Image: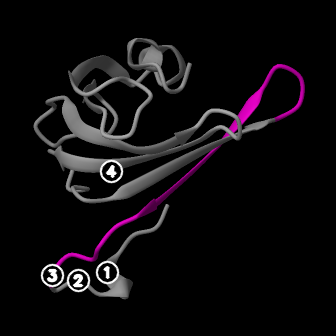
């Protein structure tokens, strides 16, 4: 379900729309556009993210995407999802990301959640 664009909102309710842009779903190079309220915007608009699938291993449930463009300031970040069975009928989602620092930013100025 995680790799299926049309089912994204079922497990990630803040995503309202997810659209195919290029390539074949599930294969490296596949590009999709997501929009919704993933990242709150000051003007109340929806956020949007164009991401490209870098790799996917459905056996180990690892998914790597690169944000190619967005209105949330995370362009170029590499995002990894690893899904782990967790208790009965539950799944733990481990999300990590790598991003190049902004010009002029220092470690002290970055907020980590």
The quarter holding residue 26 reads top left
Which residue is denoted by mark 4 in the rendering? 66
Mark 3 and mark 2 residues within 8 Å of each other at the beta carbon: yes
Q: CA distance from mark 3 to mark 2?
A: 6 Å
Within the magenta stretch, is there residue 88?
Answer: yes
Q: Which numbered disc flags the more N-terminal residue, 2 or 4?
A: 4
Query: Which is more toward the observer, 36 or 27?
Result: 27
* Residue at the image position 31 percent from the left and 80 percent from the top: 109
Which of 37 and 89 lies nearest the eye of the viewer? 89
| Eye-nearest disc, 3 or 2 | 3
Dot 4 or dot 1: first in sequence order is: 4
In the rendered image, the vertical position of residue 93 relative to residue 96, given as above or below: above
Please rate how many residues cluster around mark 2, counting C-alpha atoms within 10 Å: few if below 14, some from 14 to 19, many from 20: few
- The figure's colour scheme reads one colour
Q: Is residue 23 left or right of residue 82?
A: left
The reply to whether discs 4 and 3 touch (Cβ–Cβ < 8 Å) is no
Residue at position x 27%, y 77% in the image: 101
Front residue of 18 and 52:
52
Secondary structure at badge 4 equals: strand
Q: CB under 8 Å between callouts 2 and 1? A: yes
> Which residue is labeled 2 in the image?
105
Q: In the current view of this chain or complex, which residue is farthest to the left?
A: 43
Crowding around mark 1 (Cα neighbors within 10 Å: few <14, some 14 to 19, many 20+) is few
Instruction: Provide the residue designation for mark 1.
Output: 109
Does label 4 or label 3 sit earlier along the sequence? Answer: 4
Q: Is residue 4 above or below residue 97?
A: above
Q: Which residue is labeled 3 in the image?
A: 103
Q: Are marks 2 and 4 in contact (CB under 8 Å)?
A: no
Nearest-to-viewer mark from 4 and 1? 4
């Amino acid at each position: 379900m995680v790799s299926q664009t049309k089912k994204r909102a079922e497990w990630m309710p803040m995503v309202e729309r997810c659209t195919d842009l290029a390539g074949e779903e599930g294969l490296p190079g596949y590009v999709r556009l997501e929009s919704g309220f993933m990242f709150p915007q000051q003007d109340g608009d929806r956020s949007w993210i164009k991401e490209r699938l870098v790799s996917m291993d459905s056996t180990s449930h690892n998914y790597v995407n690169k944000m190619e463009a967005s209105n949330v300031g995370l362009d170029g970040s590499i995002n990894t999802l690893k899904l782990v069975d967790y208790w009965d009928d539950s799944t733990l989602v481990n999300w990590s990301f790598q991003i190049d620092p902004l010009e002029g930013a220092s470690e002290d100025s970055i907020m980590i959640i």
